[in-house]
Image: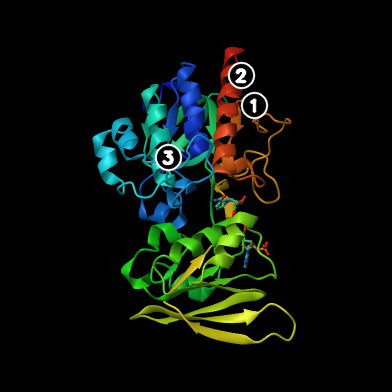
Amino acid sequence: MSAATVENLVIIGSGPAGWSAATYAARAQLQPLVYEGAISEKNRMAGTLPLGQLALTSEVENYAGFPHGNLGGFLDSALPKERRMMMAPHEGQGVTGPELMELMRQQALNFGTRIITDDILKVDFSKRPFTLFPAEGGEVKAKCVIVATGASANWLGLPSEERFKNRGVSACAVCDGALPRFRNKPLVVVGGGDSAVEEATYLAKFASTVHLVHRRDALRASKIMAQRAFDDPKITIHFNTALAEVLGDDTNGVTGVRLESTTAGGSATTLDVAGVFLAIGHTPNTAFLDGQLELTPKKYIVWKKHFRTETSVEGVFAAGDVADDYYRQAISAAGTGCMSALDAERWLAHGHG
Ligand code: NAP
């Protein structure tokens, strides 16, 4: 990108919010440029690879417009061969997260979106045009920016969890659950929300048993998801229980866990397991903004007007999970992505930037 070029609109992020924003902006002839993130080991470990959190999930049952049906032929016709070949073959009846994301990316591309597979590490929103600093060097100038960088998985912060990351400890069952080290072995999932239940249900297909460990006496997950966990004979739920330590050694990686009761007078137990999957919520990816946009105490970007995607800096808009600690659904992210593109288009049309 030449330093002299000033982009109309740069979109940072490549989940449902980023691609919806790009599709709307491209159709409005804003020639959007998307920084979709870098394909790097650092991003893999942090869960921030291109295509967002949906690319880390299995079947998606609740995205409007995608009921059960055989999508194989549609995927073949909609996606270019080289990207289709990189994907897992279509199985089951519903669309998967990675498939949905590839389709969204392709839709944005079809209308002329330009895509760069790199991270934006730093921004300067103090003067116009704004300046963005990609990891691969140089700088990009933009009249208008949409931040759609999503959120990434939380960790407990135990030293033993850190020690066994990639050797039996993971925050993504769908990415790692089918690995041989976990097959037909007992596993632990920590958390009580939809992600934890989804991961436990997914892992139960491969594991001998899944222990779902939750710190309270009731699941936070939606009723339909929670019922699946209760009904699955391979899932045992341990309420009022916390993961105190991951046990293991350098040769085998994870071999067990030490669990502690969260209620007074409760006891500690150990379980022999081959894997530990964390599903304890997410943190918005806002660190790279370095305080230049107003954030909530939980570090989500603040929308300054009711039901508008405007941030504290005029000309910078936010969409998706990076600005939403409440709904956090793929479809709501896509919806706010659309809103951010319309907000950006109107702002530019008024001669701003
Ligand atoms: P979440 O709803 O925030 O749940 C996080 C879970 O982790 C909670 O049960 C929480 O316990 C527990 N937790 C948090 N910090 C912990 C800690 N330090 N130690 C132990 N446990 C801890 O997050 P999520 O499950 O990732 O879901 C995020 C959003 O995505 C939700 O809106 C959810 O509906 C959505 N989602 C939907 C689907 C679907 O519909 N298929 C699938 C996945 C996610 P407490 O309950 O005690 O707070």
Q: Do the residues labelled 2 and 1 touch (CB within 8 Å)?
A: yes
Judging depth in this view, the residue of 316 and 124 nearest the camera is: 316
Verify CB contact (< 8 Å) between mark 3 and mark 2.
no
In the displayed structure, 240 sits above or below 267; it is above
Q: What residue type is labelled 2?
A: Trp
Q: Mark 2 points at which residue?
A: 347
The image's colour scheme reads: rainbow
- What amino acid type is highlighted by mark number 3? Met
Does the beta carbon of the residue at mark 2 sit less than 8 Å from ligand 1?
no
Which disc is residue 314 wearing?
1
Q: Residue at x 49, y 67 (%)?
A: 277
Q: Tell me which corner region of the image, top left, top right, bottom left or bottom right, holds residue 338.
A: top right
Depth check: give the residue in front, 228 or 120: 228
Tell me the quadrant of ligand 1: bottom right
Choose top left, top right, bottom left or bottom right for residue 245.
bottom right
Q: Position of residue 37 (x, y in %)?
A: 42, 42
Which mark is first along the chain, 1 or 2?
Answer: 1
In the image, what residue occupies the spot 28% across and 40% down? Answer: 84
